[in-house]
Each structure stands twice: as structure tokens, then as C-alpha cells.
Amino acid sequence: MAAADQPKLIVAADAEALAQAAAERVMARIAANPGRIAICLTGGSSPKKLYQLLGSDSWRGRIPWDRVHWFIGDERFVPDSDPLNNMAVARAAFLDRNAPSGHIHPIPTTTESPGRSAEAYARELAAFYGSEKLDPARPLFDLVLMGAGPDGHTASLFPGYPEIEEATRWVVGVPRANVAPFVPRVSLTLPTLASCREMLFEIAGHDKQPILTRLFNGETLPALRARSNGETVWLVDEAALPEGIRGPR
Ligand code: 6PG
């Protein structure tokens, strides 16, 4: 994991330290861009501590809310009133109290199908970006947050599913999930997620050790295939680290 094109591994002592380190990286990406900033959030349990931190009194004052736009990398196809809704979790944790409402960009889930939602979100992303073609020299996002599921999925790109191979569309509907919750999903595709200055994985807890071991062994699962065109960082806590591996801190 040391070569330039490999993810950079950063080890944190525990889930608290990991959230702190993630928050520092969010701030660094914000500080690096004096203009309009785009951050793509993720779902699942891993980012919850980070979201709480960003909404806390000690951090929220450091964020230039009027310059930051918040997107989401994947969504469960459930109403935003459902606790499974990824953006609703982020909104409740920190966005609604701080971000201008026009800067929060949820994936719509009130359309007739995940495919329609994907089309609508692709249009929204392209309108924000100002083009329907991604230019490698001009990333869509400053930062993309990611997680890794027990089967090696990331966003809602599951191993062996056709959506992981999508090379053209920005966003896809995923009719069937490979792991719980078994609700249809909508997901940004690998090329869209790659269009960022930094892709930051948060991987914490002993439950993650088996999948992290497989990823370290180079299994070409979605979480390993997801790479930024810029920097890819795996922020991992001690408990998730495969046996015998000690990473740089
Ligand atoms: C989702 C996520 C998903 C998540 C991983 C890890 O909608 O479920 O976006 O890709 O990041 O499944 O989830 P945990 O953080 O809960 O382990």
C-alpha cells in the first residue's frame, strides 16, 4: 500500500481518533479550495461520529457553510422520513442546523424507480458541475467519503453486479442490494466517485477485519476498485486492521 497509485493507509487508535482524523481531513480539503467546495458524503454507520463532530460547537464554526455543497454517494430507495435514508442521517446529525438548504443535495427517492432517481441526480450533478462530461483536470468533488461493506461493496456498488462496471453513466439504479438493508439503491458510479481531489474511506471496528484482510490481499472487490483520480486514503482503526499489520500513523 505504498506505491503512488495505491491507497494511502492511515491508522487511528480507535473510532474516536478516526473521526477526529477524518474531520481534520475534511477541514484540510476545505482550506485548500478558496472557491465553491463540493463534498460527497456516504451512508452506513462508519461516518456517524464524523457527522456529529462536524456539527459540534468546536467544529461547526470552522466550516465556511456558505461555500460548501453537500452531496451523497449512494442512497437507499426509501423516503427521507425513513431512518434508513442516508442523507436524512447526515441532515439530522449536522447539515440541517448549519448548511443553507440549497447547498444540501439529496438523491431524490420519490420518483417511480431507482433508475429515474439516478437520472435526476445525474442531471443535478451535471448542472452543478457545468458539463455533462467529466474533465480529469477539473474534479467534480473536493472530497468523497466512502465506507466498505462486509462483502467488499462501497457506495451501493456490489461485487459481481453490473453497476460496478458502468463506465458512462454518472449515477445508476441498483434494484437489489447484496447486503442488508435489502432495499433498492441508487449509487454514483466508479468514474463519478473518482472525480475528486481526495477519496477518504473510514473503516472502523473489529467486524471490518475480515473484509479489510481480503482487500489488503488485493481481492478486486468494489472497495478496492474505487479510487480517486487524485488521492485515495484508507483511514482505519486498530480494531479493523488485519492481524500482523501495523500501519503508519
Ligand atoms: C450504504 C453505504 C455503504 C456503506 C458500507 C459500510 O448506503 O450502506 O453508503 O456503502 O458505506 O456498507 O457501511 P457501515 O459503515 O455501516 O459499515
Image (cartoon, rainbow, N blue to C red):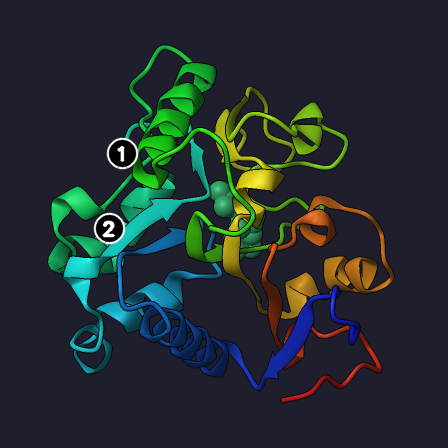
Position of the N terminus by quadrant: bottom right
Picture layout, residue 65 above or below residue 128: below
Measuring from the top left, give residue 146's x and y in whole percent: 53, 55
Say which residue label 2 marks: 91
Picture layout, residue 122 above or below residue 75: above
- Residue lying furthest top in this view? 112
Image quadrant in which you'd find residue 236 = bottom right
Can residue 57 be spotted in the picture?
Answer: yes
Task: From the viewer's perspective, tell me whether residue 88 is left or right of residue 162.
Answer: left
Say which residue label 1 marks: 80
State yes or no: discs 1 and 2 in contact (Cβ < 8 Å): yes
Q: Element under label 2?
A: helix
Residue in the picture at 55% in, 19% down: 175
Can residue 183 be spotted in the picture?
Answer: no
Task: From the viewer's perspective, tell me whether residue 101 is left or right of residue 26.
Answer: left
Q: Give whichever of discs 1 and 2 has the lower sequence position.
A: 1
Amino acid on which the number 2 mark rests in the picture: Arg
Amino acid on which the number 1 mark rests in the picture: Asp
Residue in the picture at 74% in, 64% down: 5
Picture layout, residue 62 above or below residue 30: below
Task: From the viewer's perspective, tell me whether residue 119 is left or right of residue 172.
Answer: left
